[in-house]
Image (spheres, grey):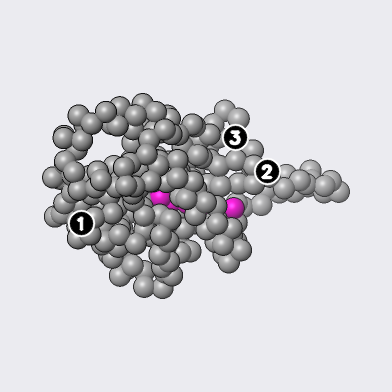
Amino acid sequence: MPTLLLLRHARSTANVDGVLAGRSPGVGLDARGAEQAAELPARLAALAPAAVVTSPLERCRETLKPLLAARPELPVHVDERLTECDYGEWSGGKLAELAADPLMATVQQHPSAAGFPGGETMRAMQARAVEAVREWNATVTAEHGPEALYVMCSHGDVIKSVVADALGMHLDLFQRIAVGPASVTAIRYTPLRPFVLLLGDTGRLDGLAPPPPAEPDAEAESGARGTEQSAPDASAAEVGGGAGAG
């Protein structure tokens, strides 16, 4: 199964103003966010994504513009299931003011019980996002092979909920996860378990590039003659931590 790069949109005007944007229209990137978006092509230079999937909201589309300009061959798909949580009546509110609402304690400490008035529950947000990831994993694998890598651009709470699922964490613990603007979280999915390779990374992503083909070892080849060599188990964790990528 493929490797997923979860990209949070770059810094938005709402982030700077301390506003919970939700699905409010007209929320774009600020000047720093535009710089972060412009850095994406260089950060992903060593990688060859098979596709891009994005939330329909403006701040995600703006974040992807420089990358897509540098990689015009990349297919782009919009998936409504990756859109921001529907915060309902909280949408557009100042976070400093929302902090006084009793619901904020539930959002912080027991998010699986949190439902926003006029909006959706956090459980529903996680369920739709994880469903989208699973379906896109299957699609990318079928079209590009199990070693493929693809980019999914979404929002903070959505990404955190997907990471919690990958880590086997209850949604009530997902507030322990932090993903900043323009950060990339990499998850490699396998038949038996996901592996979280990067969490909230804001630097270059060269370490995710596939290693060059290994040179055949003559001694190993001679010792292996006449024996059945089993393929490595993609779902097996590397005991001791492994040697890393490249």
The type of residue carrying mark 3 is Glu
Q: Which badge, 2 or 1, is on the more N-terminal residue?
A: 1
- In the image, residue 161 sits, relative to residue 70, either above or below, namely above
- Sequence-wise, the earlier of marks 3 and 1 is 1
Give the Cα separation between the discs numbered 3 and 1: 43 Å
Q: Which mark is residue 86?
A: none
Dot 3: what SS?
A: loop
Question: Picture coordinates of residue 35 (x, y %)?
Answer: 19, 55
- Relative to 180, is 65 above or below? below
The residue drawn where x is 68% and y is 43% is 233
Question: Circle 3 sits on which residue?
Answer: 238
Q: How many marks?
A: 3
Indicate which label's residue lies in the foreground, 3 or 1: 1
Q: Nearer the viewer, residue 67 or 221?
A: 67
**Start-end of magenta stretch:** 1-6
Pointer 1 residue: 27
Q: Which numbered dot is residue 233?
A: 2
Q: Nearer the viewer, residue 162 or 75?
A: 162
* Crowdedness near tag 3: few (<14), some (14–19) or many (≥20) residues, C-alpha within 10 Å: few
Residue 178 seen in render: yes
Where is residue 75? Give x, y as percent.
43, 70
Quadrant in which residue 107 is drawn: top left
Q: Nearer the viewer, mark 2 or mark 1?
A: 1
| Prevailing secondary structure of the magenta residues | strand
In the image, 150 versus 224, the foreground residue is: 150
What amino acid type should be assigned to the residue bearing mark 1?
Answer: Val
Q: Residue at x 39, y 28 (%)?
A: 110
Q: Residue at x 66, y 52 (%)?
A: 216
Q: Secondary structure at mark 2?
A: loop
Crowding at mark 1 (Cα within 10 Å: few <14, some 14-19, many 20+): some
